[in-house]
Image: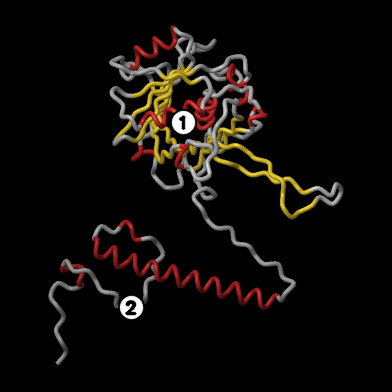
Amino acid sequence: MAPSKPKGGHASLQGKKPGNTAKVKRPITNNPGHIKNKLKRSEMYGKYLLEKKATKRQTRIQREKEAVALGEDAAPRRVTPRTLDNTRESETTTVHPDDDEVLADEAEDEFASYFSDTVRPKILLTTRPCPSAELFHFISDLMRFIPQLYYYPRKSYSVKEICSFGSNRKFTHLIVLSEKSKVCNGMLISHLRPSEGNCLGGPTAFFKVSNVIPSTDVPNNGSATSHVPELNLHGFTTRLGHRAGRFLGSLFPHNAQFRGRQVATFHNQRDFIFVRHHRYVFEEGTREVHADTGKKKTKARLQELGPRFTLKMRWLQEGTFDTQFGEYEWFHKRKEMDTTRRKFHL
């Protein structure tokens, strides 16, 4: 007697998930991060890692077999590792170094007079109300790092009042430091000097500050001198990145005193701006000798002076600081802009 079929027909019509009747192993091709069930996601992720490891091992074995088959004369095939930097999503505002339109815009922007060395920056530095004593260690490092930096106590004045105070006394920039748990966590920079195209001053930017290491904690650190450092802006590839880089570059005079051998570096990588202060040192080698002169070769190395910290821009505003009526040129909206890990804005 033949077994009776279940009522309702197919299993999917009974509200049940149909089984894999073909008994075929389905390949785990994608990262199962979209699965909402935690236990199932953990199980699938373990299978995903095992299959990924096995695929990587098979690829390595195949490369070794190809190398043996080609012989010793075959050039080894170098595999470029995939990183977030070389696989970043293309940005429509990416700037080429020889772009005439960008060069023309930068020749007439608010910072052109600083980069042409016709105007020297004069910076007013203050803090949030009632700063902790630990913040003053970072302030002293900044005063050794940035020339023409003057500290004024905040007292009970608002930022708008301080902007008026600074512009009346011919200050070109204002820096306001904030802190949390006695560690600097924010830096507001406002350009106070009016320019030909902008009579109101500006722009104003807010940077999140992280990984602050004072000069005394930098390994094998040196002591900074009063020489004006050279400026190194690196990694700013978009229109917004160029504007942020030139804004930070306007904090420094552009008459570098090379005798001091000091370099101020702002290195942008994945929208994090790494700030470093170095001195390059020339030393006489111990073993290698120059063939022509017979003298020992001179070697160059970098000595970090400090401080060391990281910036991440949160917003850029037109004009001087004004949270009520100011217009934003750019505002970082994390959920809307950071759709993937390979999306960068600077």
Q: Mark 1 packing: few (<14 Cα in 10 Å), some, or many (20+)?
A: some
User: In the displayed image of the protein, which residue is found farthest to the top?
Assistant: 168
User: In the displayed structure, would residue 67 be above or below residue 224?
Assistant: below
| Real-space CA distance between mark 1 and mark 2, rounded to the nearest whole angstrom | 69 Å
Foreground pick, 38 / 291? 291
Write down the residue under mark 1. 141
Is label 1 or label 2 in front?
1
Left or right for 157, reference 286? left
Q: Residue at x 54, y 26 (%)?
A: 249
**Nearer the N terminus, badge 1 or badge 2?**
2
Write down the residue under mark 2. 22
**How are the residues colored?**
secondary structure
Residue 204 horizontal/vertical position (percent): 42, 22
Q: Residue at x 32, y 20 (%)?
A: 323
Residue 254 horizontal/vertical position (percent): 61, 23
User: In the displayed structure, would residue 199 be above or below residue 104?
Assistant: above
